[in-house]
Amino acid sequence: MTMPANDSTSSGMRGIYQRRMLEVRGAFEAGGASGAVTIAARAAALDELVRGLWAQAIERDSRMGNGISLVAVGGYGRRELFPYSDVDLLFLLDGKLAEKDVKDAIRRVNQEMWDCGIRVAPATRRLSECEKFDAENAEFALSLMDHRWVTGDAMLYDKLAEQIVPKLLQREHKAITVRLLELTRARHAKYGDTLFHLEPNIKDCPGGLRDVHVCGWMTRLRAAAASTQKKGGAGGEGEGGGGPAADGNEFRKAVDFLRLVRCFLHYRHERDDNTLDWQAQDAAAETAVGMTGRKPKKADAAYWMRLYFRHARSVERRVTQMLEDAPATSSRLPGLKRDRKVEVEQHGFRLERGRVVLETSTEFGHDPAEDPDVVLQVFGAMARTGVTLGGDAEERLSQGLPLLSAHLEEGPALWHHLQGILKGAYSGDALRSMHALGVLELLIPEFHGIDALVIRDAYHRYTVDEHTFVLIDTLHGLESAQSGGMAEWATRLGGVLRELPHPELLYLAALLHDTGKGRSTGDHTRESARMAESVLERLELDTYESGLVVSLIANHLEMSAALRRDIFDEETVRAFAGKMQTPEALRMLTLFTYADINAVHPDALTPWKAENLWQLFIATANYLDRSVDEERLGAQEESELVHRVVALLPGQKAAVLEYLAGFPERYVLTRTPEQVRTHFKMAMGFANDPVQLDFRYAPAVSELTLVTRDRPQLFATVAGALAAWGMNIVTADAFSNRQWVVVDTFRFTDSFRTLEMNASEHEAFVKSVHDVMTGAVSVEKLLSGRRRGRRKAPLVEVETRVEFDDEASSHSTLLEVVTQDTTGLLRALSLTLAAHGCSIEVALVDTEGETAIDVFYLTRNGGKLDKNEQRVLRRALIQAIEENAQ
């Protein structure tokens, strides 16, 4: 029987729900409601709304009174509805009602919820469909573990809760467990397998709320495997039936904190945005979100983030234990280090199924968790084999820390243990575990200052301590077989690492290199070196070893700085070599710099940077080795490169030599023979087209190479054309030969995804740049047609520096500009240089996060700039930078 709709009733129900949401928000923002109370209140209010809407649907069509049940699943089923999270609502059918019969009623309920601002994620399933597990849609089976009846046919729901779901879990628990582990590990890998991000996603990052749910699901799957699963829908409570109620107090506090912070983020962003960005960190610290007990008068974001990381670390430790304790069926999954057959000298502990198990006090004579020798052997075994701590061992080590401190001895014995840990293939993981338990700070108190330390830098992804561990991971990774885009350089540097006579000193320097960032002195390299001296004195290293470590820490940024110069200029190599002194120091710094760049974030180390790093290493090694005739070696290298290019261009050796004459060595050493051949052919095509362009599109970073005759404002014109299309120049370089042939290469990202979304625009883009270069279209007209949007406030304010150096090059004045990266910056700089009569001999443009680092080798009237010209140019460049930023 069909009844007329009552729109005023629907409107009234929506109004009640919306008012209730305002009350819930008011209570939360006034500090009167916790995160748990807030999310439960929204779930309760939504229950009332759904029941009312369904009662109205039954009034319209009495057939809806039987054979269909509305079931809350997922977060809604757990009564965890965050302010702007989606609502997972299952419309369960008994099979007698056809979907077409209920389609209008379901659509109306969903529409009413959408009109109320609720993002509903509905699913319609027959009861029989809920019996099946689909590995490609494992999320549905996981959501079913958190089920709860809301309204509709209660008897139908009872069949789901008491028969279908328990049987599904008992029958498919192995397959669901395997799939859950796969999904969890893939999600963790997406975030670099670390929770220590500068701007973490508190839901999906390791240690986030999704891991809390994984703990609950794993508990229920274990129960199903043991055939002790209770009947009914109890799984809808707490954390999926086995969450914090079954875990320790520390874990419960962590879950409460994460819930509170997620509510805070949702209300702040007014959407389902779970990223703890820097502005949110500032606001959370200012309002003391989640801080209990005695609160500091003014908590800064760094202090508050340490609170967040401490709680996230508790969740990560719990989920890691549960994943590693998973049934043997999951051992085939990548990343699990169980049943590893290793030979480990055991003293007070044993290895079982990939876990460290401490002996009891009865077995050992006293508690091995309080014995420094045993504890350090445990971490040494972890570093060598990749095994992890068992739950009992972790708890006992944590409790035994005070007595461990009382018995700890320093000097050679401690260094013996520490170098064994540092040299282990899995030392990064062992050090993380030591750090989490407080053991690392016990050995090296200086490390405490960078515990979960956030440095406001858009270039870095990780906290300072996690950056250190990733750096050590990268170094050890060089010892393994290589694959992927960086395999060539990693293989070369792996050979360098194997030649080091004291690799443990490299790892020790890596561990200590950023400890100075915990002190606000302004020069962390100097402070880190000073703090390292204290550590080395306690470890009683000899003078030579201490000197290597301190020198490496003090100079650990020097190679990165040298890469911004013309690394094939003799003066650059000589100056850099002067800071190295010995081949061993050079090898250690090269390895360190490679790993340090890679540990900034996954995309920081590019083949281009790796090749430049390798070339600087070779050039400096040759300079330090007095038995090598570097000029003759350079000529041989050039001859070899020319030979390789000529081999690709039979019969054109003379033309190739003429083309290469005058190019800096950097040009031929940082291009493949195939690239040089392409540029040569482009130069040979000037008769047909004086502007030759080679465009290579890539989703991440595209590349445009221009080969043409030199002319005033050339570099600025290309930069302007790219800016007009909204392209963000990431790196660029420019070279010219004796014939005034210019090869300019620009690497850029597509800010507005114009080229990504419209493949047909690729040709139009190249034609546009070509027209600008030929003068058919003025760059000013092209720029005027671009709507200049409102500039986003930078995450980090970069102070502008404009510096000149007359010593870095024998024939040019080096100009280095460090400033905020803004659209159009490179064009503004290039136009200013041209306006002051400067010729760009070499340009090296790089971007690190929001920092632009642009290096130009300049001449004026064929010579270097004098001091007065530099002062005038400096003022003009600063003015241009300020005007471009407006």
Image: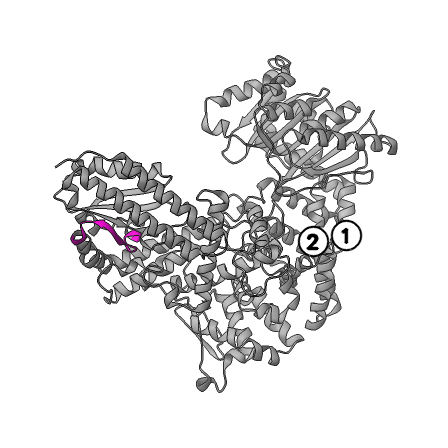
Q: Give percent across and percent down for residue 42.
A: 37, 50
Residue type at mark 2 is His
Residue that carries the numbered disc 2 in the rendered image: 556
Find numbered disc 2 in the image and state the secondary structure of the residue it sits on. loop
> Distance of mark 2 from mark 1, alpha carbons?
11 Å
Q: Find residue 2 and report its image quarter.
A: top left
Relative to 1, is 154 above or below? below
Residue type at mark 1 is Lys
Find numbered disc 1 in the image and state the secondary structure of the residue it sits on. helix
Crowd class of label 1 (few under 14; some 14 to 19; many from 20; radius 10 Å): some
Relative to 538, is 58 above or below? above
The quarter of the rendered structure image containing the N terminus is top left
Q: Which region shows up in magenta?
A: 142-155
Residue that carries the numbered disc 1 in the rendered image: 579
Colour scheme of the picture = one colour
Relative side of 541 to 66, left or right: right
